Image (cartoon, grey):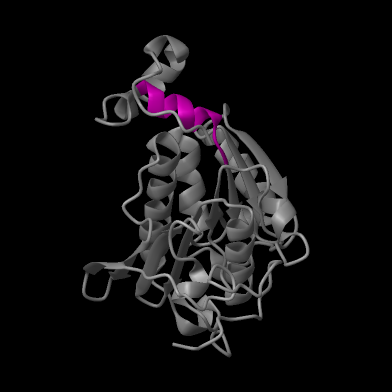
């Protein structure tokens, strides 16, 4: 990602079509044409094209991101349709990345979209994230979440992470070693997980959290700003309460602590001492 700051790029670097399409961005204080130009040059990896990935991808593409890589190996099922807003009845049984790529290209044909029909795992995670400017984790399981975090920390890439459960959601931006990593905050993974359709999840919550993830990514890529770098947004739609809490680095974190023991992405190793 470019380190230049807003103010160095003129309107002449944008085409007339871009000036019209992104006028709302160009009018924003601290964003402007320089921010839009940086956004156009940026590449994002989206892990998971589900409840969070669908709205996040839509807003990234509409915002004028340069390139978006979609990673997911799932097919579309009926239970997805309540919250995965890129899909409809006619898409059942198709690969999520294929349908998403079609719909996203229709939103903004200038964005380069790559579909990777595979699951991100420890053995391929670093290769998957490499070459991108930022990673968005919209996966639906803890095993993948730890692997994505490890790969981003090891490759020195910013990671926007989000999750939803029933009526609650959370969003954070991790940029290890400048901020805590996901393992600092959650040193141990729960022993068992319950799928969304069994535990329940408010469909609109996915849109709320996914949009917040896209907003953080766009602002980070456009001008290096993030309200959630080293912080976490907690959302409770049952009470419509929002909290923003500061995160702390863990000195004993197995990934980014003083004596790291994790040197490749893994879903099982945790910080040395559970907290």
The foreground one among 42 and 18 is 42
Q: Is residue 16 left or right of residue 94?
A: left
The foreground one among 13 and 225 is 225
**Can residue 15 be seen in the rendering of this structure?**
no
Q: Where does the C terminus fall, quadrant-wise?
A: bottom left
Q: Which residue is drawn at 38% across and 36% down?
A: 223
User: Which residue is situated farthest in the right direction here?
Assistant: 123
Q: Residue at x 67, y 58 (%)?
A: 72
Q: Is residue 263 above or below residue 40?
A: below
State which region is magenta.
Answer: 33-43
Total number of numbered labels?
0
Instruction: Estimate the x, y position of residue 266 in percent, counting from the top left.
Output: 68, 72
User: Which residue is situated farthest in the front direction here?
Assistant: 258
Q: Is residue 196 above or below residue 41?
A: below
Instruction: Estimate the x, y position of residue 29 in percent, counting from the top left.
Output: 24, 30
The foreground one among 67 and 78 is 67
Q: In this view, does 191 lie to the left or right of 167?
A: right
Identify the main secondary structure in magenta.
helix
Q: Residue 38 lies in magenta, yes or no?
A: yes
- On the image, which quarter does residue 88 sit in? bottom right
Instruction: Estimate the x, y position of residue 91 in percent, counting from the top left.
Output: 64, 55
**Can residue 255 be seen in the rendering of this structure?**
yes
Q: Residue at x 34, y 75 (%)?
A: 167
Q: In this view, does 204 lie above or below 59?
A: below
Q: Residue 44 lies in magenta, yes or no?
A: no
Instruction: Estimate the x, y position of residue 228 in percent, counting from the top left.
Output: 35, 56
- On the image, which quarter does residue 243 sit in? bottom left
């Amino acid at each position: 990602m470019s380190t230049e700051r807003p103010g160095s790029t003129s309107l002449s670097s944008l085409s007339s079509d871009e000036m019209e399409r992104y006028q709302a961005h160009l009018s924003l204080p601290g964003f402007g044409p320089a921010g839009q130009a940086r956004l156009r040059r940026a590449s994002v990896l989206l892990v998971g094209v589900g409840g969070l990935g669908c709205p996040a991808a839509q807003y990234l593409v509409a915002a004028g991101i340069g390139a978006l890589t979609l990673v997911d190996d799932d097919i579309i099922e009926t239970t997805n349709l309540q919250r995965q807003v890129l899909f409809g009845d006619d898409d059942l049984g198709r690969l999520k990345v294929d349908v998403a790529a079609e719909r996203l290209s229709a939103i903004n044909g200038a964005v380069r979209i790559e579909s990777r029909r595979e699951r991100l795992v420890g053995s391929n995670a670093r290769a998957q994230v490499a070459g991108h400017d930022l990673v968005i984790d919209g996966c639906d399981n803890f095993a993948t979440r730890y692997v994505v975090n490890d790969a981003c920390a090891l490759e020195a890439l910013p990671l926007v992470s989000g999750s939803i459960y029933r009526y609650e959601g959370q969003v954070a931006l991790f940029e290890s070693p400048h901020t805590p990593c996901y393992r600092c905050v959650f040193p141990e993974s729960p022993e068992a997980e319950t799928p969304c359709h069994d535990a329940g999840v408010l469909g609109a919550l996915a849109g709320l959290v996914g949009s917040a993830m896209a907003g953080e990514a766009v602002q980070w890529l456009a001008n290096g700003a993030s309200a959630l770098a080293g912080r976490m947004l907690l959302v409770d739609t049952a009470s419509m309460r929002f909290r923003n809490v500061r995160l702390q680095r863990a000195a004993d974190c197995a990934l980014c602590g003083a004596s790291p023991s994790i040197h490749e992405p893994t879903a099982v190793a945790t910080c040395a001492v559970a907290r």
